[in-house]
Image: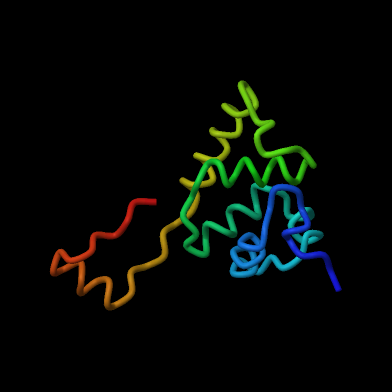
Amino acid sequence: MPDPVSTIRNLGPASDVAFARAGITSAEQLRTLGADEAYRRLLNTGHKPHFIGYYVLVMGLQGRPWNDCKGVEKTALRKVFDALKASVTPAPLSDIEIELNKLGVIPRPAR
């Protein structure tokens, strides 16, 4: 049985669930894809983008603690994160979301 995603440093059981939604079910698969492609796939499932979550993943794949990301490295990762976020097309609204938006009940959250 392959090692779960949560065996990668900094990642826990919630990561197993989130990445499984993106079709990534093992630590080996995540390592093969790399942080950028794996995070892009995660965002494509509708996962809310979060910079800390992204650099935690990057650090974990390097075997480093999440809080090791600082300075110039963190600034560079922020640029990559922003580009990843911009590359993802939001999922189309469901019929109920369309109707609720017409009523002004729930505006679609910004991504």
Q: Is residue 9 above or below residue 23?
A: above
Q: Please tell me how many numbered marks the rendered image carries.
A: 0
Query: Which sits in the foreground, 11 or 58?
Result: 11
Q: Residue at x 54, y 46 (%)?
A: 84
Residue 51 in percent (x, y) is at 53, 41
Q: Is residue 55 above or below residue 3?
A: above
Residue 68 in percent (x, y) is at 69, 31
Question: Seen in the image, is 87 located left or right of residue 36?
Answer: left
Q: Looking at the image, which residue sits at the far right? A: 1
Q: Looking at the image, which residue sits at the far bottom? A: 95
Q: Residue at x 39, y 51 (%)?
A: 111
Query: Which sits in the foreground, 14 or 2?
Result: 14
Q: Residue at x 37, y 67 (%)?
A: 92
Question: Seen in the image, is 61 located left or right of residue 85?
Answer: right
Query: Which sits in the foreground, 6 or 86?
Result: 6
Q: Name the colour scheme.
A: rainbow
Quarter-of-image position of residue 81: top right
Q: Is residue 74 above or below residue 97?
A: above
Residue 18 in percent (x, y) is at 59, 64
Q: Residue at x 15, y 68 (%)?
A: 102
Q: Looking at the image, which residue sits at the far top? A: 72
Q: Is residue 78 above or below residue 100?
A: above
Query: Which sits in the foreground, 106 or 92?
Result: 106
Residue 71 in percent (x, y) is at 61, 21
Q: Looking at the image, which residue sits at the far left? A: 103
Question: Which image quadrant: the N terminus?
Answer: bottom right
